[in-house]
Each structure stands twice: as structure tokens, then as C-alpha cells.
Image (cartoon, rainbow, N blue to C red):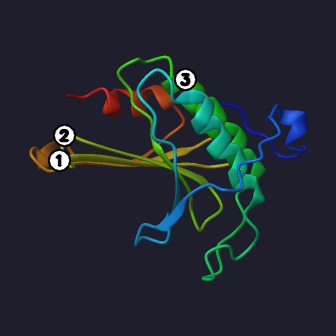
Amino acid sequence: MTTLQTGSPESIGFVDVDYVSAKTGETGEGLYDILAKNKAGTWLHECQKHVAELRHLPPNWDSYGANPVDIGSIANALEFIDMLAEYPAISAPNVAASPAGNVAFSWSWNEGDRELDVEVTGAGMIRYSFINESEPNHDAEGQTAYPEWVASLLLRR
């Protein structure tokens, strides 16, 4: 993943997205979801649009002082989901903005038994929290610069 410090959305390859009618809803954890729900294998383009749309969130978008989403976080998140889409077994994530100004993704599978929350920073770090309710000793939390580590969590069955 690369780190992007400056540049316009157009200069880093964003498509011009007119997706103002995105559905949003509070998760109860200070994140607002812009859901990207498609079948596996067809979700990448829609997810890219949702991530790119986050650049339009203004400061204080959650009325609790949230930062606007960092352009570097958006660029790194786009690279991250491009890599994840190479794995057919990985399904579409929920896409959100974090109050810290990063792009966030979440997955839930096995009827909510397993959950993975990820935040991609502008510096290229990926913060993650993996919860496996049926096997708590497999829970994992931390940060990495390697998106393959996150893919390995998503591919656990």
C-alpha cells in the first residue's frame, strides 16, 4: 500500500462518483455505514464507489467532532479492497468513515459469530479487531502494514 500525502481525487485515480443517495445509518459506535452489499465477485466496483464518496464528508460530519476522511486513507483503502477482491471467498465489506478521519470496513459471518473491523489509515497502517465468539482464543487485535494478514483473517472458516 502506498502513502499519499497530497493530490486531488482526480489525480489519484478516483472516478467521478455521483452517489449522493447512499444509505447511511449510525452503528452505535460512532461510525456511519455506507453499505456496499453485493454478491461475492461483483462487489468491488460498488465498494470503490462507496469509498470514494467518503471524500465528501465535511468536518464534524457526525456532529461529535469527527474529522473529514483523509485522502491518503481513501487511496490506501482503495488499494486494500483491490487486493481483497482477488480472493473469491471474501465477501463485500460494509464501508464506513471513522471519526478519526479514516476509511473503515467491517465483515460479519457465521450468523454474526465472527466479526472483523478494519480501519485503513493515511499512513498505510491497517488497524484490525477480529472477534470469534465460538473460539475466543482466536480473537485478534492490532495493526499491520500487510493487507494479506487481514485477508487471512477473512479466509478463516
- Decide which of 93, 73 is in the foreground and name it: 93
Q: Position of residue 83 (x, y in %)?
A: 55, 23
Report which residue position mark 1 lands on: 113
Q: CA distance from mark 3 to mark 2?
A: 23 Å
Residue lying at 39% horizontally and 31% vertically, measured from the top left: 91
Circle 2 Cα neighbour tier, 10 Å, few/some/many (<14 / 14–19 / ≥20): few
Gap between marks 2 and 1 measured at Cα? 5 Å
3 or 2: mark nearer the eye: 2
Q: Are marks 2 and 1 in contact (CB under 8 Å)?
A: yes
Identify the image quadrant of residue 75. top right
For residue 79, which quarter of the picture?
top right
Relative vertical location of residue 66 with respect to residue 108 in this rendering, above or below: below
Residue on which disc 2 sits: 110
Q: Disc 3 or disc 1, which is closer to the eye?
A: 1
Name the amino acid, label 2: Asn
Residue drawn at point x = 30 percent, y = 26 percent:
155
